[in-house]
Image (cartoon, rainbow, N blue to C red):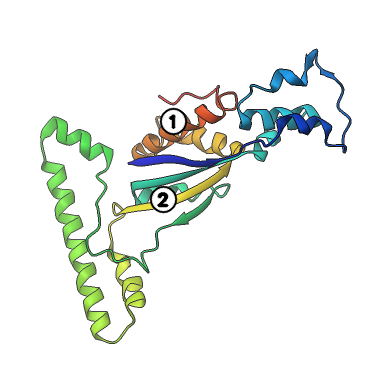
Amino acid sequence: MIVKLIAHTVVTGWGDMRDTGWVDYPEEIDGETWDAFENFADADYLAEFAGRFCYQHTSVLEHSSATFLVREVSRSLLDELRTHRHLSFSALSQRYVDSSNPIIVTPPAIVEDFKVRGNTTQLLLDAATDHAIGTYRELVERLTTAGLPRKQAREAARSVLPMATETQFVVTGNMWAWHYVLGRRVAASADAEMQLVAKEMLRQLKEIAPNTFQDMKDE
């Protein structure tokens, strides 16, 4: 599993935000000068700026965003994470990429079982995935031999690939979306692989927006 924060909101010229001209800010807000917010993390500051203007709550978190590159996770995880329509994805395409020698991501439960009882369940997983990948290769070969373009052959053959097949993707969401999604995905009842990814995302988000995520635990 590789999770890396690769982009996030940065406020350019925070001091100028007070003097935008389209709204009149007083010198003090609730007894604090605007200079007091100079040391905020950028994502937190932007939410604070919006909140001081509109005096609402979660909507102010939608102005900042963060983007992650995620690799060495299962297709199953991607499919589940994609159900959160607040997030935007760019994912590896199995139509264009050869999947005849894929990495198989072992589910956490099987990893833990291996530590306790040996490789019984791991061997079962290996046998099932080897058979599926072998079928994929044969389908691609037969369909291309029959005259189909490689992309169309892979498109048809991918139907037999295991959900444990490794994938990679870039995902972007605003801070409200990340707070909503991760609040559900770090829970003990969430998918085990998803918990690992969500906790790592939350850990990194706390570095760039500590106030936004201060109410959430990443471990």
Q: Secondary structure at mark 2?
A: helix
Q: Decide: is 69 above or below 156.
A: above
Q: Where does the image place residue 161, in percent across and percent down from the top left?
A: 28, 61
The residue labelled by disc 1 is: 187
- Looking at the image, which residue is at 26% across and 86% down? 146
Give the quarter of the figure containing the C terminus: top left
Which of label 2 and label 1 is nearer to you?
2
Circle 2 residue? 78
Residue 83 position, x and y percent, is 50, 50
Location of residue 58 in the rendering, given as x and y in whole percent from the top left corner:
67, 32
| Picture quadrant of residue 194 | top left
Q: Residues within 10 Å of mark 2 (few under 14, many from 20)?
A: some
Q: Nearer the viewer, residue 87 or 118?
A: 87
Q: Is residue 153 left or right of residue 10?
A: left
| Nearer to us in this view, 128 or 203 | 203
Q: Is residue 192 above or below residue 126?
A: above
Give the side of residue 9 with respect to residue 160, left or right.
Answer: right
The spot of residue 193 in percent (x, y) is 34, 40
Disc 2/disc 1 C-alpha distance (Å): 18 Å
Which quarter of the picture shows residue 62?
top right
Which residue reaches farthest top?
31
Horizontally, residue 159 falls left or right of residue 182, namely left
Give the mark nearest the N terminus, 2 or 1.
2
Q: Secondary structure at mark 1?
A: loop
User: How many marks can you see?
Assistant: 2
Q: Are marks 2 and 1 in contact (CB under 8 Å)?
A: no
Q: Amino acid at mark 1?
A: Ala
Near-viewer residue (26 or 79) = 26
Q: Please, what is the three-letter code of the amino acid marked with disc 2?
A: Leu
Residue at image point 74% right, 32% down: 50
Q: Is residue 75 visible?
A: no
